[in-house]
Amino acid sequence: MPRIGSGKRYARAAFELALEKNELEVWQEGLRKMAGLTTDQTLMALLQDPRIPFDAKKNLLQKRLGDIHPLAFNLAALLVSKGTFSRSSDIFQQYNNLLDAHRGVERARVTTALTLGTKEKEVVSGRLGEIVDRKVVIDDHVDPSIIGGFIARIRDTLIDGSIRQRLEALKKNMVEAGK
């Protein structure tokens, strides 16, 4: 649990610095690069190896991150020095959440039986936007088991308009009526 809070703290600090200097996208790109490095298992093993001097780790990090905001690089170096660079993905996600909230955007995870086309995404996004009274960006996923309709999750709100859910409700009603 402390890891999540810590990721939020780092993300909040980075966001406040970026907002103050009007560098929201620059920071976002730097944090994206950092998060991307966490998928390289060889690199992560080197960054976490206590036998490797910090300066060597810092040089390796500089080569892999390339040209990023100097303060974002300092954050990466700090995380490496604490042995917590793996939190970069969480920090990046938390930063994006703060950026979305700042821009008045909500993200919805929408699951459908078939891939949504551009028009369908716009319709679903518009309808969900009416519900939450904000612009909604859809992260779409496909799950054929829902048969049809969609399931949307916006923060802690679940909207289940799937055919599978309707069939289960119908089955439950028929069983109750047969008693």
Image (cartoon, grey):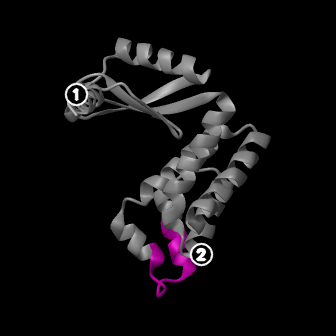
Mark 1 lies on residue: 174
Please say whether residue 2 is one of the residues in the magenta stretch. Answer: no
Mark 2 lies on residue: 82
Q: Residue placed at 54% from the left, 50% from the top? A: 92
Query: Helix, strand or loop at disc 1?
Result: helix
Closer to viewer: mark 1 or mark 2: 1
Q: Which x, y percent locates residue 153?
A: 45, 35
Q: Main secondary structure of the magenta part?
A: helix
- Left or right? Give the position of 108 relative to 121: right
Q: Which residues are magenta?
A: 47-60
Rendering quarter of residue 113: top left
| 1 or 2: tag closer to the N-terminus | 2
140 and 67: which is toward the camera? 140
Q: CA distance from mark 1 to mark 2?
A: 59 Å
31 and 100: which is toward the camera? 100
Please say whether residue 49 is one of the residues in the magenta stretch. Answer: yes
Q: Residue placed at 26% from the left, 32% from the top? A: 176
Instruction: Residue type at mark 2: give it.
Output: Lys
Quadrant for the C terminus in the image: top left
The furthest residue to the front: 179
11 and 59: which is toward the camera? 11
Q: Residue placed at 31% from the left, 17% from the top? A: 117
Residue 59 in sight from this viewpoint: yes
Query: Helix, strand or loop at disc 2?
Result: helix
Q: Which x, y percent locates residue 47?
A: 47, 73
Q: Which x, y percent locates residue 72?
A: 63, 55
Instruction: Residue type at mark 1: give it.
Output: Met
Rendering quarter of residue 80: bottom right
Quadrant for the N terminus in the image: bottom right
